[in-house]
Amino acid sequence: MAIPEPSAEQRETLVRYATKHVEWLKTPKGLANLKEHRDHEKYFKEKLSHENLSKMTAEEFRELYKALWASRIWTNKDWYVDHKLLEPNGLDKLKQELSKLLYSSEEIARRYDEFKANVKGFGPSSISEILHVVFPHKFCLWNEKPKSVLPFLDLNLLPDRFFKYQITSGEDYLLCVKVLTLIKNELKDFGIVDFIDLDLFFWHIYDDIMPTVPKEARKEIKPVSIAVPITKRIKISDHEGAEYYLLELGKKLGFITYTADQSKIFNNQRLGDIAILKEIPPFAGERDIGSAREIDVIWFGEDENPKYCFEVEHTMDIIRSLNRLAQLQHLYVKFLIVAPEERRSKFEVEMEKYPYRRMRDRYRFISYDELASFVEVATPFHELKAKLLGEE
């Protein structure tokens, strides 16, 4: 793919914000952020040196992963390291594949693809961050910062799908590197000499400038119910209970779970502590991420893309939930309304109306009793799977 050069207008935009960035770097916040970025680089260069990587223990790997900015999305980082990285991959394989990713003589697109194929639990943000901090002159960081800032600056140098979805291949990542290299080179007169400087530039715009600009001013079949035997041991009778069991069920089924209602309490447990994710993974651009943050419960796959989105409707108008889910209709994801059984008829009526009828194969209705039954069925299966196969 041919990469377009920045236009004169885009260069003017870069210069305008780079000038502000130079002044920001002189402030206490700018100096603190610069130190944080360079300390981050120093830490990973030391820990992931040839010599230290070969000697790394499981506990050292745990601390290394928890130090990644990409790991901030996990509520319980230790659980994720144990169950999604160390157990499925093994420490020796992790060290071997990290060494190949960082130090192989293969070209980067192939290294990226091989690492992603051979190692479970790493997404584009964490893979690119590891490359970026060890070799900041060669490799860029690709996460929610550039995915949000580039559209804000109207720097449309990458395909739209790079901002709507996760990148999926080494060739995608290589294209990100090439485009961000162009931008970095445009800013060299403003002290941006490597990709850590560029990430700090993006960080400044994302954290300090974009929040001050109103979003509107930025460029930017009949429903099928789930039939399962009804059981009575679990009783779901309110919004918090439904979300709690959705989070527990998602985890048992192997999904990465998120809830918008982090502070709500059920059975003396905070829902944010039950969810695996503390923040939404950067699976799309700012608009879609903003919409996803408001959804009651989301089950993500290991590729950090949403698979199932749940809205719990206890007393509110069901149309509100249908509309909230519809904001992500362009993504490959299923939408589920979870509510008392008596609300099913209202759901089915709305599914016959525009615009829902054209998306009716995307929506499902699950009653509280059906959800309880699903949890009852999944729990012994999960326990037996862990016992017989050693998998959780």
Image (cartoon, rainbow, N blue to C red):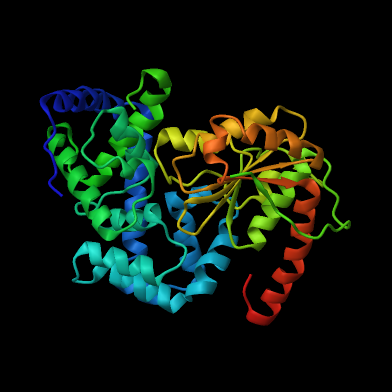
> In the rendered view of the protein, which quadrant contains the C terminus?
bottom right
At 66% from the left edge and 45% from the top edge, which residue is drawn? Answer: 272
Task: Measuring from the top left, give residue 82's x and y in whole percent.
Answer: 56, 67
In the rendered image, is residue 130 in sight?
A: yes
Query: Is 371 situated left or right of 45 in this image?
Result: right
Task: Measuring from the top left, give residue 122's x and y in whole percent.
Answer: 43, 61
Of 192 and 325, the residue lying toward us: 325
Q: Is residue 332 above or below residue 390?
A: above
At 39% from the left edge and 76% from the top edge, which residue is drawn? Answer: 55
Of 18 and 220, the residue lying toward us: 220
Task: Measuring from the top left, give residue 32's x and y in whole percent.
Answer: 38, 36
In the rendered image, is residue 42 in sight?
A: no
Query: Is 304 situated left or right of 79 in this image?
Result: left
Residue 199, picture quadrant: top left
Residue furthest out toward the right? 232
Residue 230, picture quadrant: bottom right
Of 372 and 170, the residue lying toward us: 372
Residue 375, picture quadrant: bottom right
Query: Is 100 situated left or right of 11 in this image?
Result: right
At 68% from the left edge and 33% from the top edge, which residue is drawn? Answer: 349
Q: Is residue 91 above or below residue 248?
A: below
Task: Measuring from the top left, give residue 344's x and y in whole percent.
Answer: 75, 39
